[in-house]
Amino acid sequence: MKKRVRVIPFLLMVLVVMNFKPIPTAACSCMMPPSADIALSVATAVFSGEVVKVEKNNKDNGKTIHFNVREIWKGIDSATVSVFTGNDSASCGIDFTVGKEYLVYAHTMDSSGKSILSTTLCDRTAELANAADDLTLIGEGQIPDQTEQTTDSTNQYYVYAGILAVVVGSIGLFLWKRSKKS
């Protein structure tokens, strides 16, 4: 009987240990990056821009970097763009700093069924101050169109809902006063 009692804690420990899930890990290993002109031709998008926001993305084990675009060489046509990268250098992520400018070589990546731009340590992405050789090879880019939409669709929804509420309220008030007179 005592042996059975001793086995139960042991079995419970085994069950607990078996239910632990390993922490996902990653290791980054890159080949020598191609020259800037070749990297330009194989990249989906190439641009320079200032980092305005770094947003941690736990779902995809990385972070989204938001840029104000200064110059475009390929692949985008707006004044702002977001690019995904890994959390740290172990997962080939780049440590972007808010306020600094970068030359970004990005590729498309599938995330939750949609295509997003992504960059890694294996690309030629670098701080703009350290990218003079690249800029010489790829030449001048184009300045993005600075016209941006000032109202987003969410704000428009509230404006239309407010107008509708005022109109319906006015009609209701009118009908209520009219029925009171009768």
Image (cartoon, helix red, strand yellow):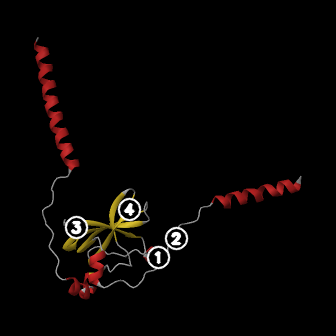
Q: Name the residue: 46% across, 77% down.
A: 28
Front of the two marks 3 and 2:
3
Return the disc, 1 or 2, that comes first in the chain's sequence. 2
Q: CA distance from mark 4 to mark 3?
A: 17 Å
Q: For mark 1, what is the residue?
A: 90
Give, as a three-letter code, the residue at label 4. Answer: Asp
The amino acid type found where label 2 is placed reads Thr
Is any atom of residue 17 visible in this view?
yes
Residue sitting at x 18%, y 46% = 156
Contact, CB < 8 Å: mark 4 with mark 3? Answer: no
**Disc on the earlier residue, 4 or 2:** 2
For label 1, the crowd category at 10 Å Cα-Cα, with few meaning under 14, some 14 to 19 and many 20 or more, is some
Work out whether mark 3 precedes mark 2 in sequence or the reverse, and give the earlier one.
2
User: Residue at the location (33% across, 63% down)?
Assistant: 116
Answer yes or no: is residue 103 visible.
no
In three-dimensional space, the C-alpha distance between marks 1 and 4, rounded to whole angstroms, equals 20 Å
Q: Nearer the viewer, residue 131 or 151?
A: 131
Q: Secondary structure at mark 2?
A: loop
Q: Say which residue label 4 marks.
A: 110
Q: Is residue 131 above or below residue 170?
A: below
Between the C-alphas of marks 4 and 2, the distance is: 20 Å
- The mark found on residue 76 in the picture is 3
Question: Mark 4 or 2, which is nearer the eye?
Answer: 4
The label shown at residue 25 is 2
Which amino acid, by three-letter code, is at mark 3? Ile
Closer to the chain start, of discs 1 and 4, is 1
- 110, 147: nearer the viewer: 110
Q: The residue under label 1 is which amino acid type? A: Ala
Separation of marks 3 and 1 at Cα, in angstroms: 28 Å
Q: Position of residue 172 (x, y in %)?
A: 16, 24
